[in-house]
Image (cartoon, helix red, strand yellow):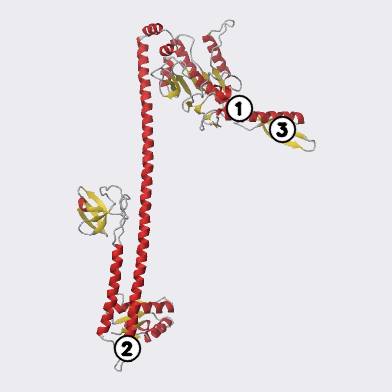
Amino acid sequence: MLVVRAFVTDVPHRRLLIRILEVDPRGPDRIVGTVATSDAAVELLARWLDVLQAKARLAEVTGANAPTLAQDGRLVLIGARHPLLMRGVVSRYSDAVDDLPAAPVPVDITLEPPATALLITGPNTGGKTVALKTAGLLALMAQSGLHVPAEPGSALPVFRTIFADIGDEQSIAASLSTFSWHVRNIAAMDRDLQRPALVLLDEIGAGTDPTEGGALGIAIVEHFRSRGALVLGTTHYDALKTYASTTAGVTCAAFGFDPDGFRPTYRLNYGTPGRSLALEVAARLGLAPSIIQTARQHVDVKDAQLQDHLARVDEGLRQLQRDRAAVERERQTLRAAEGDLHARESALREREEQFRRKLGQRLDERVREARREIDAVVDDLKKRTSVLVTRVTSQQSAPRLTTGDAGAARVQAQSAIDEVAQRLRADVDAPAPPVEAPPARPVAVGDRVAVGGFGLEGVIVSTSGKQAEIDVRGKRMRADVSDLRLLAGPGRSANTPASVRVNVTLQPREGLLSELNVIGCSVDEAIDRTERFLDETLVTEQKTIRVVHGHGTGQLRRAIATLLKDHPQVESFHTAPPNQGGGGVTVVELKE
């Protein structure tokens, strides 16, 4: 294949140099020559551009695509169309476009290793010969640098030789009958064949006795296969149909037809030999019914049985194709339903997540409000305590708060805190807005469940009949499956609606208000924490507390001592005994 690969300008001599290469897909390019004269170079360049433009226009008219050059010997043409059956092509050189259909019926031609031969059967006028011509023409177009009228994904090997035995060139002068012309043509192919090769054989073994012609056709196909060629052929012979159906490396395909009017569909069905339908096609083309009836009477019983068997096979194949189409429609419906289900699940999860976020925000806001109210109660208690201390110290007697005053202050503070806690619990326990949930399902291993009547939550470890074993905080217990209720959370099914459970504890933590550890804090942090710690003791019965500040440089001890010296709640303070921390701990005695 000759291609103009590059051209440059010879500036000193003002000449246009064009290099012409012979492109070999299997080896390096070979330089054929270089055109140096300006006139010849311009003319060659113009022709080259004309060829490129013609290729592009042909591809546009035929809806062509670039084929893949297959390295593994496969020949795959998807939706192939013969260019000379297209109105857009024929109209450029002929006015006889009215007889053509609006568009040729595309055909899939597939021959992939390990198969090296494809035998096409089917009724007369069914499209067998056109399929052969389409395969050969598209192979030549691809090797000429043209796009081919086939769908993307089509692949063609690169052939050294392509042979076609199609048509009839009998000659009385040359003593060539139909059969003898075919034989001489095939013999010439055999002499000139170079691999890789494509051999197209139309009506293999035709023109002679069907029995001998069928045997000869089988031998011809086997011979070309043995020489490494890809063989595409058509036949009506039962012997070749049987050979194609039972021989490894040989594929059979048949053009379909409409069972009602015996009209061809021009579509290939792979894996089954088709019927020739000679009598049916002849009747459709207008042959007298009496002739057709007489012909049926002369059909051999064995041939009739074979034709009947092939008819049942064809019907089974059509039914299979209808079933496949129904299955594909059902599969598409299921895919659409699955997509809708996923969309609903995603929407449900999004709604659940939004609800959780809003609920969390609401709870955070309510907790902040409750904390502000509690801080206000503590501040009020501190003010009242200061007032009481001031009132007592202003009296002539020894300054001392009565138990009644201190108790009343604690009771009022505790009541205010309880009221805040009740309001917060009421907000937390308010019913959540309904969330759409899928139907309930039986519990299974790994689900998180609640055990009815006990108020316990756990994860199902195993099930046995109507009993289930549940892991509750590391402890195992057994319960009836009917008493279990599916919960949301880790270990649950994603199909179970989520529930939110919040526990709010506003009571002082017993056992922790007797000691405060400020080791590692700065002076400001230690003072702030000590002040808050003293405030929290107002609602407790603590009389003595410990502040652990460590030895260190003594800054924390001195700063805390300064704070305690003037604090209204502090009666006295001193260093802890050696066996209780010594100089690293300050013991504080609180006022009653």
In percent of width and height, residue 320 lies at 36, 26
Question: How many other residues sit within 10 Å of disc 1, few (<14), some (14-19) or many (≥20)?
Answer: few
Quarter of the picture holding the C terminus: bottom left
Badge nearest the viewer, 2 or 3: 2
Q: Answer whether labels 1 and 3 touch (C-beta < 8 Å).
A: no
Is residue 578 in view?
no
At 30% across and 73% down in the image, what residue appears? 417
Q: Answer whether labels 2 and 1 touch (C-beta < 8 Å).
A: no
Q: Secondary structure at mark 2?
A: helix
Residue 4 position (above or below residue 559): above
Residue bearing the label numbered 2 = 391
At 31% across and 58% down in the image, what residue appears? 500
Q: Secondary structure at mark 1?
A: loop
Where, by quadrant of the figure, is residue 290 drawn? top left
Question: How many other residues sit within 10 Å of disc 2, few (<14), some (14-19) or many (≥20)?
Answer: few
Answer with left or right where residue 408 lies relative to residue 206.
left
Q: Nearer the viewer, residue 494 or 4?
A: 494
Residue bearing the label numbered 3 = 18
Tell me which amino acid carries mark 3: Ile
Answer with left or right where residue 237 lies relative to residue 375.
right
Q: CA distance from mark 1 to mark 3?
A: 21 Å
Residue bearing the label numbered 1 = 144
**Pointer 1 or 3: first along the chain:** 3
Tell me which amino acid carries mark 2: Arg
At 31% across and 76% down in the image, what residue appears? 513
Badge nearest the viewer, 2 or 1: 2
Where, by quadrant of the figure, is residue 539 drawn? bottom left
**Pointer 2 or 1: first along the chain:** 1
In percent of width and height, residue 118 lies at 47, 22
Where, by quadrant of the figure, is residue 514 drawn? bottom left
Q: CA distance from mark 2 to mark 3?
A: 116 Å
